Amino acid sequence: MKSAIVGIVLLAAVIVAMTSLFAIDEAEQAIIVQFGEPKGDVITDPGLHFKLPWQEVRRFDKRLLIWDGDVTQIPTRGREFILVDTTARWRISDPLQFLRSVRDEIGARTRLDDIVDSVVRDIVSSTELEEIIRSRDWSVDVKHLEDPALAERSDVDLKQAPKLGRELLEQEILQRARRLMPQLGIELVDVRVKRVNYIASVRKQVENRMIAERQSIAERFRSEGQGRSQEILGEMGRELRAIRSEAARKAEEIRGRADAAATRIYGRAFGADPEFYAFFRTLENYQAMGPNTTLMLKADSDFFKYLERTRPRK
């Protein structure tokens, strides 16, 4: 009988221990809730803790949590419609207030959707597109532009620095959103704009404009290339004519020297034996005449001098 009573007591102790003891790890904090109402202080120390069996433990994360907003279409101050993708980092700073205001992380994310998206929409809609895209320390060296004509466009001021820039704009979003966080038991640590893009219709217009600009640049390059090609061909033609002229001059000089040398040789040959030279030249003239050649000469012409000498004697 005693052993049964001891067993029942032990079983009851085990059941009470299982329903009353709970563990909290380093990344958690907890609140004991009784019939829907918080009881006691926030439990932040890791380890085993005690509660009554009919009480409930609500656990909350101590770590930084991520909030990613939906991609939102927002018009800027200049009426350019853009898609803004925002993210934030937050933590539960007051679990008791957090429990009373939003109850859990799902409710907290819903409230963050409302608050952060609203602040982002208000700030973006009152800000120029350049302020959203550029950084405050952004600067452009016109010398390094692929298309120098961009510096002369009236709708783009590359030399004007942004008044706020992306970083200060994000800080302003963070400060405005933080004002509403204490009543939720939330600490908003950081807000960032992950991505900014044009909507589909505007993006198509921008793409067409970029294509037109690239085609204009390509056409200018082709025109410059054709001009340079004509310049190179002109220079090549002038060099070719100069080479041909120099070659013709040298050829005339060579022919002149050859004719002079031939004249000197002929002169030396004529001076050595004038009679033989005259005879040889006459034979060449005889040989140049064809079989049907007819000449009208005087009987005392020198052309017959050697022919008369070759007549047989009677």
Image (spheres, grey):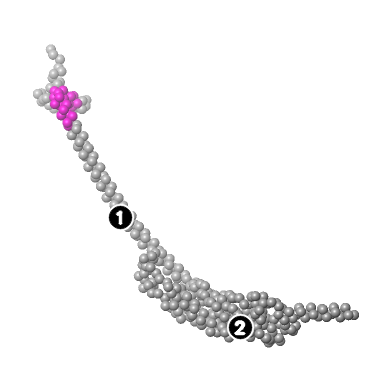
* Residue 301, percent from left and from top: 11, 25
User: What x and y, as percent, mark residue 166?
Assistant: 47, 75
- Point out residue 212 in the picture as x, y percentages from the top left corner: 41, 66
Residue designated by label 1: 231
Closest to the observer, 136 or 121: 136
Q: Identify which amino acid the numbered label 2 is placed on.
A: Asp
Q: Is residue 269 magenta?
A: yes
**How far apart are the two marked residues, 2 and 1, measured between alpha carbons?**
78 Å
What residue do we see at 24% from left, 45% from top? 245
Q: On the rendered structure, is 161 left or right of 282?
A: right
The residue depicted at 52 percent of the width and 72 percent of the height is 194
Residue at image coords 29%, 52% = 235
Whole-percent x, y for residue 308 in the image: 13, 19
Q: Which amino acid, by three-letter code, is at mark 1?
A: Glu
* Mark 2 touches mark 1? (CB < 8 Å): no
Is residue 293 in the magenta section?
A: no
For the record, the magenta segment spans 263-285
In the foreground, 314 or 247: 247
Residue 220 — which label?
none
Q: What crowding class fits label 2: few (fewer than 14 Cα within 10 Å), some (14-19), or many (20 or more)?
A: some
How many residues crowd around disc 1 within 10 Å: few (fewer than 14), some, or many (20 or more)?
A: few
The secondary structure type at the circle numbered 1 is: helix
Question: 126 above or below 252?
Answer: below
Name the residue: 69% across, 77% down. Answer: 47
The quarter holding residue 95 reads bottom right
User: Can I make out residue 129 in this image?
Assistant: no
- Horizontal relation, residue 271 to residue 28: left or right: left
- Under tag 2, what secondary structure? loop
Question: Which residue is denoted by mark 2 in the rendering?
Answer: 94
